[in-house]
Image (spheres, rainbow, N blue to C red):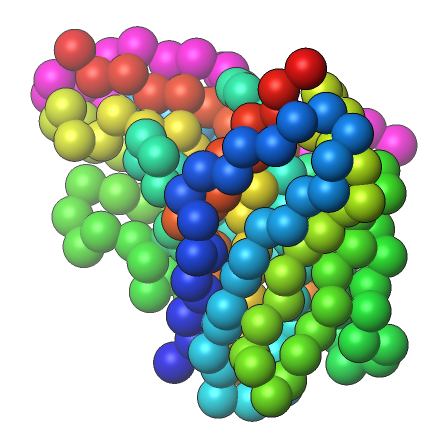
Amino acid sequence: NAGVMQNPRHLVRRRGQEARLRCSPMKGHSHVYWYRQLPEEGLKFMVYLQKENIIDESGMPKERFSAEFPKEGPSILRIQQVVRGDSAAYFCASSPPGQGGDTQYFGPGTRLTVL
Amino acid sequence: AQSVTQLDSHVSVSEGTPVLLRCNYSSSYSPSLFWYVQHPNKGLQLLLKYTSAATLVKGINGFEAEFKKSETSFHLTKPSAHMSDAAEYFCVVSDRRAGGSYIPTFGRGTSLIVHP
């Protein structure tokens, strides 16, 4: 059973460009979470999604950030018009249905660098 | 509201000596508590989890943690450090929200340094 997969592992963008980060949850998992980790800090929750639904987006910045988890395909975290402050590691986690996310399994992360 | 405080940003030990990484939490209800380890440029790996069963929780790689409700602590220990234990460790508290989902709060992390 493959673990949580994220791609790309490293992404470089110039200011003003768009960044798209992908997350494929573990097989059988229907809950996806996105987190952001700034240097020397813990992970900060951004958004919690189930298939075709955003359950909790209380950690998402109000502008430029969006997330989706379509019926088919990976979950996408989209950052429009990136700025230098968006440079961080973005982690995705998944959990199986029925637990509400009690135990989450993390992907290797995407490291975004904004030039 | 829930919060986590990892009391040490860095802990330095010699190989073969005990490890203690401290964590205090606050939570409105009976939380789930976790320790995760992150090696450089890697994702997070679950070490262990407490969910109101036994207060002493055994995890992988010889780690264990003890839940002490009276002290609101969940310290991580290991009897004998190995060089491969050098990594960043995160304490996490997770409350069940009104909608039934768990949204975790992470501590800032403790960097474990192991000297030969």
| Magenta span includes A9 | yes
Q: In this orientation, which residue lies closer to the viewer: A101 or A68? A: A101
Q: Is residue A12 magenta?
A: yes
Work out whether A62 lies above or below A107: below
Main SS category, magenta section = loop
Stretch in magenta: A1-18
Q: Is residue B34 left or right of residue B48?
A: left
Q: Foreground residue, A102 or A57?
A: A102
Q: Residue at x 83, y 51 (%)?
A: B59
Residue toward you, A59 or B91: B91
Image point 63% across, 67% down: which residue?
Answer: B74
- Residue A75 seen from this side: no
Looking at the picture, how far across and down is residue A46, in whole percent?
38, 52
Q: Is residue B98 above or below residue A3?
A: below
Residue A86 lies, with reference to residue A28, above or below; the image says: above
Residue A20 drawn at (x, y percent) = 38, 26
Q: Quadrant of the C terminus of chain A?
A: top left
At horizontal 16% and vertical 31% (from top left) the residue drawn is A85
- Residue closer to the observer: A13 or B6: B6
Q: Quadrant of the N terminus of chain A?
A: top right
Q: Position of residue A52 (x, y in %)?
A: 54, 55
- Can residue B24 be seen by looking at this rendering? yes
Determine the image quadrant of residue A100: bottom right
Residue A62 placement (x, y as % from top left): 18, 55
- In the visual, does A6 lie left or right of B6? right
Residue B53 placement: quadrant: bottom right
Vertical position of residue A31 compared to residue B78: above or below = below
How many numbered marks have been drawn onto this rendered protein structure?
A: 0
The residue lying at 74 percent from left, 68 percent from top is: B66
